[in-house]
Image: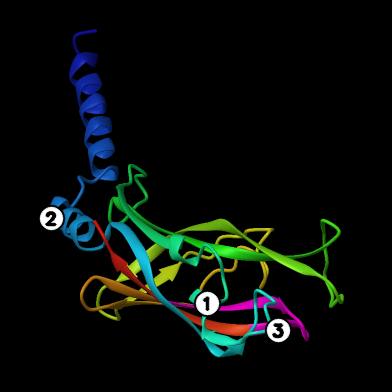
Amino acid sequence: MKKLLPYLFCIVFSAASCKKQNHLPIDTQEFEQMESKYAGYYHILTSIANDSVDLDLDGNKNTDLFNEIPLLEQSKVTIRVLEDNDPRSTKNYTTSFELLYPEQYALVEGREISSYTPGAEVIFLDQPIFNRCLIDTVKTLITLSPENNPHETERRFTRPNEIKLLDDEKIQVSTIKEFYTKIGFIKINITSIYKRVN
């Protein structure tokens, strides 16, 4: 038994060493820099369409979507930088991107329609999208992870096609979305600017 004790000690010590190697300590400096520079809430400043549109069906067209989408002033982006305890993580922190932007619903007698129908009404409801993301400080881009959302379409839960980091704690979010209008469903390019408030 005494001869086995040194071997048992070596096995236990080796296992403990492997465990420590697999779970690297968090790079505190990088984590804190990312958190202080990017994490927080970003409130919307502007939201511009590439063409004049009438999304609220009041007969007036605008490129400034604050004149077309009720609740738009409540739109915001949330960026989170969190510790990641997954031993497979290369950075030991994870970043996520959440966008709250009003979704348009076209209704006839309370039922949603999928094609142009005279007399339809539209309502707007806040709907969030959430994705893990990669913040590329060199290219000044935020890239969303390719997560599969079965509800995502060009009308609903639409992920931005580009997110840019701008100066003065601002980000630019570009999205192609489909909206209902008096000439039917159309796709528009939306460019929105958000500014961090905390």
Secondary element under disc 1, as helix, strand or loop, is helix
User: Over which residues does the magenta segment extend?
Assistant: 173-187
Find the residue positioned furthest to the left. Answer: 29
Q: CA distance from mark 3 to mark 2?
A: 47 Å
Q: Which residue shows up at 31% across the image and 56% down it?
A: 90
- Circles 2 and 1, Cβ within 8 Å, touching? The answer is no
Residue 91 pos. (x, y %): 28, 56
Residue corresponding to mark 1: 67
Q: Which mark is residue 29?
A: 2
Q: Is residue 26 left or right of residue 74?
A: left
Dot 2 falls on a residue whose secondary structure is: helix
**Three-letter residue code for mark 3:** Ile
| Quarter of the C terminus within the rendering | bottom left
> What label sits on residue 25 in the rendered view?
none
Kindly identify the residue that appears in the image at 18 percent across and 52 percent down. 27
User: Upstream in the sequence, badge 1 or badge 3?
Assistant: 1
3D distance between C-alphas at marks 2 and 1: 44 Å
Left or right of residue 173: residue 182: right
Which callout, 2 or 1, points at the residue further toward the start of the chain? 2
